[in-house]
Image (spheres, rainbow, N blue to C red):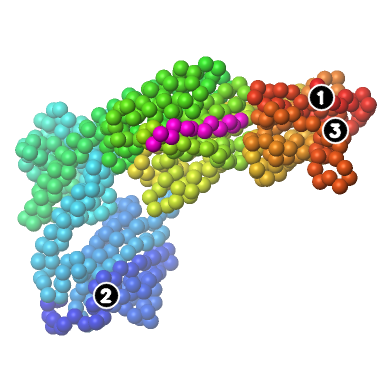
Amino acid sequence: MAGRNRPAIGADKRLALNRMGSFDWDLLKRTLDLDAAGLAVFDLRPGEYDGNPETLSRRVPPEEGIRLDATVDRAIRSGRTSYGAYFQVTRRNGIRQWTHVRARILRDAQGSPHRVIGIVRNATTELTEFAEVSAEEAGRRRLTGIVQGTTEALSRALTVDDVTAVLGDVAGLERFGAEGLALGLVDGGAVRLVALSGESLETAEEPPVAPLDDARPLARAALTQRAHFATSLPGRADDRTRPRPHVDGHGFDAAAFLPLVAQARSIGGLALFYRGRTHFTPEDRNVCLGLAGIVAQSLQRAILFDQEREFATGLQSSMLPRDIPAFSGVEIAVRYHAAWSGRDVGGDWYDVIALPRGRVGVVGDVQGHDTHAAAVMGQLRIALRAFAGEGHPPATVLARASRFLVELDTERFATCTYAELDPATGAVRAVRAGHLGPLVRHTDGRTGWPHLSGGLPLGLATEFGQEDFPETRLDLVPGETFVLCTDGLVEESGLDIEEGMAELAHAVRTGPGRAGALADHLADRLWHRWGTGDDVALLVLHRAPDPGTRQAPRIHQYIHQADPEGLAETRAVLRQALEDWGLAALADDVQLAAGELLVNVLLHTEGGAVLTLEVVPGPVRRVRLWVKDRSSAWPRRRWPGEAATSGRGLLLVDAVSARWGVEPRGDGKAVWCEFAPPDRPAAAARGRGFS
């Protein structure tokens, strides 16, 4: 045994004390590959191992090999996806070394195992030097390690679901040495089963419930506060030791039914199920009872936490709008996601406000993640809604909201982006107070972050006397999508926020078109990806497409200021549309005129341009091109000299179009031009000049 011929620990063993290696076992080819660290755990040199598992087993004492093979065979045959075990390895100097393996079983679509991958490590430092202690002492120290490991894992569990996950995962079951687990909580006069082998049953339509006076051992243990250990479960048709029907058919041989008691009060029961066990030693019983006490304390703390969180989230949800008003021509979807840490309550909010002339939209974020942040959020949201309802422009709305926040006598500040949209025209007036700006998805699928000049966060703006919030004018053309969110959607600890913004843009670009479907897509792609500890408020607004009619189709494009890529994309979109409409012969002329008009807007105004291409029905079909901007200065036709390098734009438009003109549009203008099919007499179509 390991106690014979106790030589001093050599250099080779010291090298392997902290080794952890990996292995890949191909069950079909019957080969097992070990990396260099894995070979060191088995005290093998590279040339001594040929990949044959039989060669490796020579390092394992026969009795240890039988026990390890049985563990692996049970895991594979029972359909489990993983297993773990401690076993001894005989090193080349004759000393036995305790080793630990944890592995995952990979199965094909039919459930047949074909591969096992995992780690193997030297457990000497964990279970002390087994060359110098007896197997009994090693067992006691291992049980102590189980208690310590469970205590450490449960110390990080906040909710009942967290406790369930710790108990029922592979590591948790391995700590108990159990094959299955059932957890029940006292609920009134009954025990309600909330977990089975770690799988939460909270979502079940009717969670299994047993009265406290029921004869089942789990309920009896909770009622009497006394443990019950059973070693002959199967073979009885009237067996009431199992929480039927939830563990029937799993072939368990023994079970420990443990009361969960905290402050002299039963809060539930824990059942551990075993295969191949014929008895429970006194040490086993003591460890089970000790673990039950630890679990009870953790559950009591988790139950109180869940109750407090339920109250906090109820408070927060009551402060968010219950219903989102509907607006003709736009589809709006909102989502809220509480932080996964803390009390699941914070200050992020969204709102959709119905104002005169259909203006709409706001999203914000109050500093902090607690009930105070939620309370401040609720008051600020109501105040901002009131200021907007009074008809103030966006900049004034935020200035008044900033003053209101200071008057609340709170140290919290808030960030906010407030946008007013006219669904009929697509005109947007947006202001920003220390917050992320909007993300826009264009009709051609491209995404962009329009530049919004921002001010200081609300509260701070008033404290520093800088209540200026510059207003930015945007145009949302039919078919485009407007996305507002709080920073929890794009921030991840340790990463630049630019990376998160790029991920959001990619998710929006590749997501579905409808607002609700896109909001769900973002939730799936980003909230779960970040595992965020921050709240997230999300508002997605999609303006309904305007394809015209079958006889008079139309398309819309928005081109941002200084966006060369947008110009190129627009030319391609125009050509494709004309080909689809059977008017490909006009593509060159339309592209040329559109390029000249767009460049004129982007060079000589301070904003972008809205482009519309439509078919005008009539005795002779015509194509009309519109380019709208927010400048009040009308273009004028010039006659540049031969050496001039500019000034020929309108001359080119005049040359390629049948007629063109300019019309006033609100605070800007629209330049239009029409194109006649090539077979129409040019003289009959022409009518150049302003109209």
Residue wearing tag 3: 654
Name the image quarter holding the C terminus: top right
User: SS class of the residue under badge 3?
Assistant: helix
Name the image quarter holding the N terminus: bottom left
Q: Name the residue rendered at 49%, 45% in the picture.
A: 501
* Mark earlier in primary sequence (2, 1): 2
Measure the C-alpha gap from mark 2 to mark 3: 85 Å
> What is the number of the mark on residue 690?
1
- Quarter of the rendering containing residue 194: top left
Q: Is residue 476 left or right of residue 550?
A: left
Image location of residue 165, percent across then percent down: 27, 45
Image location of residue 451, percent across then percent down: 55, 39
User: Of the residues shown, which amino acid type is indicated by label 1?
Assistant: Phe
Q: Which residues are magenta?
A: 464-475
- Quarter of the rendering containing residue 62: bottom left
Measure the C-alpha gap from mark 1 to mark 3: 11 Å
Q: Report the predominant secondary structure element of the magenta stretch.
A: loop
Residue wearing tag 2: 16
Measure the C-alpha gap from mark 2 to mark 1: 89 Å
Determine crowd level at label 2: few under 14, some 14-19, many 20+ residues with C-alpha closer than 10 A.
many
User: Of the residues shown, which amino acid type is indicated by label 2?
Assistant: Ala
Dot 2 and dot 1 residues touching (CB under 8 Å): no
Image location of residue 151, percent across then percent down: 17, 51
Dot 1 and dot 3 residues touching (CB under 8 Å): no
* Mark earlier in primary sequence (2, 3): 2
Q: Name the residue rendered at 6%, 41% in the picture.
A: 226
- Quarter of the rendering containing residue 457: top left
Q: Is residue 511 left or right of residue 584?
A: left
**Residue 468 in magenta?**
yes
